[in-house]
Amino acid sequence: ESHILLRRKSFMFGIRWKQKSSFPTNADFSLAENEAILAASKLCLIFIVYSFLASLKTKTYSHVDRLWSLTPIFYSFVFTYYGKFNSRNVLMSALIFIWGVRLTRNFARKGGYNRGEEDYRWAVLREKKILNSKFGWLLFNFSFICFYQHALLFLITAPCAWAATPYAQKIPLNEYDLYATLLFLFFFNLERVADNQQWRFQQAKYGKAKREAKYETDYQNGFLSKGLFARSRHPNFFSEQMIWWSLCVFVLASGGSALPQSCSEAKENWYWLRLPKTLRCCGSCFFVSIPGLKCGCEALHACYVGAALLSLLFQGSTAFTEQITAGKYPTYKEYQKKVNRLFPALRPPSFFLSAENAATRIQHAWKKKKKSNAATTSTPGKFKKAFLSFGRKSSSNNTPAKKSE
């Protein structure tokens, strides 16, 4: 018997589904759903073993990178098959498919599928004290590069698993599915534009394409700081994270916003995770208004875990990438001070000039300061004595600085 009461009302574009659903229990799910998760888990295990064995044979460690844009497509197809090709699963699979095709093409044009090609960051990471031993790197390769990253790719498709459940299939497409689709496509296009801007810049920088006058300063500095990169240092990284958070909105569209009313009710259902004590919130905080997060039972919907872990991964990898970049390009630290790391600014800040012009501006600032000090010491009037004494103190204090210059 269905636990959902659906009522159809007029809405924008002519349709709105107003739903009132009771909290789903394990009885609302079938063995077919467990079979879908089991089949996708086996596929994930195959990818892990392949990436690990391939890295041992080739001594390169970017095999997960080569599969990054492909494995979510396979997982979404598995869940769509076990979900009996319901409309929501088909829509989600189609979105993931176009995401994967675009990302695969972008990775291929950068030479990512060339034999022996490897992410430059792995070589830097291997020099770290903990990882420069054979056993240390072997353990890191299996645990993080192969196992964790493939498990993460499996978890970010968890909303597809939820949509395949009989409980979710009873809820037809509604306005939240529209919101999820529009958000997904918006960030998909944002990532596409950012990748294309970076690609054209890098091609011109290394003489493989014609240089544009507006990027001349960036060519000198060595990195792109115009276009979307004037608003965010990594707009493509930001968009990639938001794409998978957009997919989580499909969970809300298919009944995932129904919250457990007690701790015991949350414990009895596999898709609710109990939060550790450090992450629990009080009943009066603002988190209670977030769908999927319930202060009363301190539980988190499992479908959000993949997107959350992906955001944490990007925080660490972006910081490490920028550490390498700042070591290569002296002016990158100034860029870091003025432009957000991930979240794009609505209004791009005014960026710095080239290194030569920056030195000129510093010299002008010193001259202006000296001129103002000279004007201060020669000011007539009743405060002349005070200004002169201030000038003598200032000049004595400035003597060491002049010697150091």
Image (tube, rainbow, N blue to C red):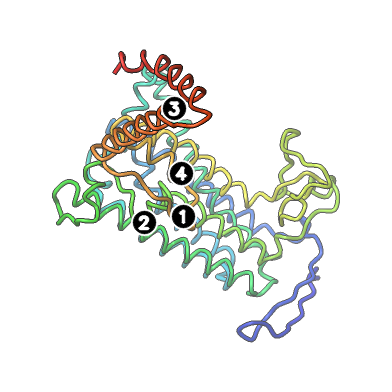
In-front residue for pair 101/147: 101
Answer with mark 2 or mark 4, whichever residue precedes in sequence.
2
Q: Nearer the viewer, mark 1 or mark 4?
A: 4
Q: How many angstroms separate mark 2 from mark 3 (CA)?
A: 31 Å
Count all numbered tags in the image, as a single digit.
4
Q: Which mark is residue 239?
A: 1
> Mark 2 near mark 4, Cβ–Cβ under 8 Å?
no
The image shows residue 50 at horizontal and vertical percentages of 38, 40
Q: How many angstroms separate mark 1 from mark 2 (CA)?
A: 9 Å
Question: Looking at the picture, does residue 123 appear above or below residue 192?
Answer: above
Residue position for label 3: 140
- The amino acid type, in three-letter code, at marker 4 is Arg
Residue position for label 4: 341
The image shows residue 219 at horizontal and vertical percentages of 22, 46
Q: Taking 177 as reference, is 107 left or right? A: left
Helix or strand or loop: what does disc 1 sit on?
A: helix
Other residues around mark 3 within 10 Å, as few (<14) / some (14–19) / many (≥20) = some
Answer with mark 1 or mark 2, whichever residue precedes in sequence.
2
Residue position for label 2: 194
- The amino acid type, in three-letter code, at marker 2 is Ala
Q: Nearer the viewer, mark 2 or mark 3?
A: 2
